[in-house]
Image: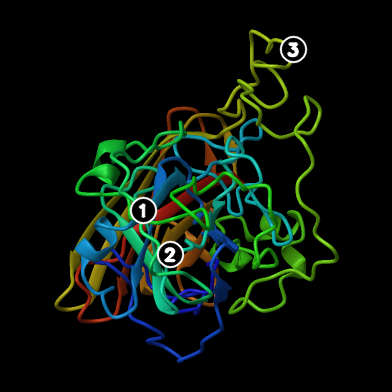
Amino acid sequence: SCPWSFDVDPGRPADTTGPCETENVWHGVKYPNEYKAGDRMKVGWTSNNHAGGWVRIALAPYGQHKTHKAFDDNVMKISCYGHDQRPGGTVYGDCKHPCNARPGCEYQAYEEDNARFDTTVKIPHNLADGDYVLQIKSAMSSHPHFYYSCAKISVTGGNPSLTCPQDKLIVAPKCLKGTAVELKEYTKNSKPGKFCYNKDGPGYIDADMYRVPKNVQCDPRITCAVSIDGKGCKNQDRMKDITNDWKPEQVCGEVKPAPAPTCEDGVKNQGEERIDCGGPCAACPVTMPPTTPADRVYSKFDFKKIAYPSEGYLNGNAIVHVRHKVNGWNLTLFFDRKVEISQYWGGKLLSVNEFKTVYVFKNNSWNGRLGPGSKVTVGFEGKFDLGAVDSPNLMGKDFVQS
């Protein structure tokens, strides 16, 4: 979502084929992404209620961007996908969007501060003037396949006569792991691009990460419409200030470069083991707050589906194993593309978002009171767009006491 992608429709379907989504397929809306060689650029993505894994960022000339190899041969960096670091914020690879993601007018200024669903990159100095495509590739949380998204950017002021050798290795940070795709799958077939990050030589992409990126106003969180907790999402830091889901950004005053790191700045930086402890700071406490809330009401959440892409038909069943006594419940399903649910059972439909990707069900009168060890099943039939390569995937889910 930062910089503005090929398709800025916030309800666009996820792309699992790559290397890019179709350019402006829905509405032809375009926003300028104009940069000069040496600029820093904020790169961010919506959490989609997920946590863990990595993001590979690559840059290829526009016109050469329709093959995976073009991006495999021009990798800029690998960053963490992100996760909600607050106690209880991330559980079993899931979090509730926006998952403490960084808002507009803020940016990653330290390499260790890499868990907030964004990063920054430096526009290489040896690019010829012209258009390029920035690609992100990620298999977050428990998803067994990669998702792709691209943005078109225009670059001026480079020196294409400057040449730099190709690095031998792609260095990846230590991140909360996804549970399905290992880091080696991100680096497989990937090669560092021959980019020059100094005016006179190779340099390092993040040597000046403290500098304010040109598009610092961009807010990668986009919208609460994709959250499994829409009400809670709206109460998160400045989410209500995003007035245009198609161009999510904040109104910034003066954004100054990041100050020198300290042991009291609330940021994991300067080699700290955890936020403001370890490394150059005081030792971290032996115990940490639990990452699994003690009041979570379910122990297991299964989703089974039967789909026929040629017919656009989907039959699904969500099976929840209850952990604590429940007096009334809400169940949320979040799909990676539009699903038109026509029939359902096991619960009442409480709400559906504008993109028809997030459905919230509530209990019937006969299955609202549940004891420990109980199971509840909500099933449905629905339709999705014909011609899709595969059927809709369940991107997120939740089950809470109402």
User: Residue drawn at (62%, 39%), measured in percent from left and top?
Assistant: 113
Q: Secondary structure at mark 2?
A: loop
Earlier-in-chain disc, 2 versus 3:
2
Residue beneath label 2, please? 126
User: How crowded is the residue under tag 3: few (<14 C-alpha within 10 Å), some, or many (20+)?
Assistant: few
352 relative to 329, above or below:
below
Hey, which residue is sitting farthest right in the picture? Answer: 253
**Which mark is in front, 1 or 3?**
1
**Which mark is in front, 2 or 3?**
2
Earlier-in-chain disc, 1 versus 2:
2
Hey, which residue is sitting farthest bottom in the picture? Answer: 28
- Tell me the amino acid under the disc marked 2: Asn
Which numbered disc covers residue 280? none
Residue beneath label 3, please? 282
Percent x, y for residue 143? 32, 48
User: Residue drawn at (45%, 35%), measured in percent from left and top?
Assistant: 173
Q: Secondary structure at mark 1?
A: loop
Examine the rendering and report whether any part of residue 113 can be seen. yes
Residue beneath label 1, please? 164
Q: Secondary structure at mark 3?
A: loop
User: Residue drawn at (64%, 72%), measured in percent from left and top?
Assistant: 248
